[in-house]
Image (cartoon, rainbow, N blue to C red):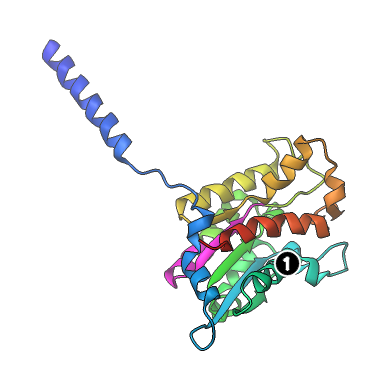
């Protein structure tokens, strides 16, 4: 009986050791994830090349503020472009926006090859969760994974964005449906070791500090200029000089 117990104990210890040796995926470090891209941005002509930033998603990255107004230059993709051109004056950067208002990730995945990868992105941003409420977690996960996998196969750097607020849902309720999509995006960023912008958390911090989320929104589910600026600031951290 003692021999069996000893063998069982030994087996248990070996299992614990093996579990500890398994590396758990984590979200990438913003200061190093785009190091190669940053080096390209610093190069001067004729050694430089064009860097393509592609923003794929729904109405928020497309620049919709209070529908039907589209405030392109104050949306986070173009605020990022403005920042990069100030920081890297020698760089040639294309800000390519493939986002479509009202679209969800299933629809975005269906046109991914022909309307996204065709632009040969160096960095790809994906932002669909607000509209993925309509398709549910399972279908959204499948669509996001297909886009991530296709991008990584072509050596594209991928950065996922969790949803900005929908004021019809309680931002501080961890069980609401949008929070579940946020958690799924975080899980995907960890599983595939790609970049993450946790937009949801950015606005949560404001709410927890007692600030009115409405002050950062142009309508119930679209950020205003200040809201876009907060998202852009998080993205900028990925392009800081090493």
- Measuring from the top left, give residue 225's x and y in whole percent: 82, 60
Foreground of the two, 222 or 212: 212
147 part of magenta stretch: no
The magenta region covers 148-162
- Circle 1 is placed at which residue position? 79
Helix, strand or loop at mark 1: helix
Image label count: 1
Residue 52 in sight here: yes
Q: Is residue 149 left or right of residue 6?
A: right
Image: 129 above or below 91: above
In the rendered image, the quadrant that contains the N terminus is top left
- Measuring from the top left, give residue 151's x and y in whole percent: 49, 69
Residue at image x 70%, y 39%? 176
- Count neighbours of disc 1 (C-alpha within 10 A) and say few if under 14, some if 14 to 19, many if 20 or more: many
Foreground of the two, 86 or 143: 86
Residue at image x 44%, y 70%? 155
- Measuring from the top left, give residue 123's x and y in whole percent: 55, 69
Image: 166 above or below 232: above
As drawn, the residue found furthest toward the top would be 1
Image: 98 above or below 3: below
Q: Give the image quarter of residue 128.
A: bottom right
Foreground of the two, 82 or 151: 82
Foreground of the two, 91 or 15: 91
Residue at image x 26%, y 32%? 17
């Amino acid at each position: 009986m003692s021999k069996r117990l000893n063998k069982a104990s030994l087996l248990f210890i070996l299992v614990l050791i093996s579990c500890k040796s398994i590396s758990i995926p984590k979200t990438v470090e913003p200061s190093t994830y785009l190091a190669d891209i940053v080096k390209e941005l610093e190069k001067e002509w004729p050694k430089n090349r064009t860097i393509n930033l592609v923003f794929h998603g729904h109405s928020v990255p497309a620049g919709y503020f209070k529908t039907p107004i589209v405030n392109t230059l104050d949306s986070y993709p173009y605020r990022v472009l403005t920042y990069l051109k100030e920081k890297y004056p020698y760089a040639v950067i294309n800000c390519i926006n493939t986002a479509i208002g009202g679209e969800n990730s299933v629809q975005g995945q269906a046109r991914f090859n022909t309307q996204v990868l065709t632009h040969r992105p160096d960095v790809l941003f994906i932002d669909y969760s607000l509209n993925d409420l309509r398709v549910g977690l399972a279908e959204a996960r499948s669509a996001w994974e297909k886009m991530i996998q296709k991008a990584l196969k072509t050596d594209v750097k991928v950065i996922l964005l969790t949803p900005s607020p929908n004021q019809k849902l309680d931002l501080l309720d961890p069980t609401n449906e949008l929070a579940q999509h946020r958690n799924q995006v975080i899980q995907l960023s960890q599983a595939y070791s790609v970049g993450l912008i946790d937009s949801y958390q950015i606005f949560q911090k404001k709410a927890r500090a007692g600030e009115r989320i409405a002050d950062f929104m142009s309508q119930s589910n679209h950020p205003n200029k200040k809201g876009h600026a907060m998202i852009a600031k998080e993205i900028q951290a990925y392009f800081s000089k090493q």
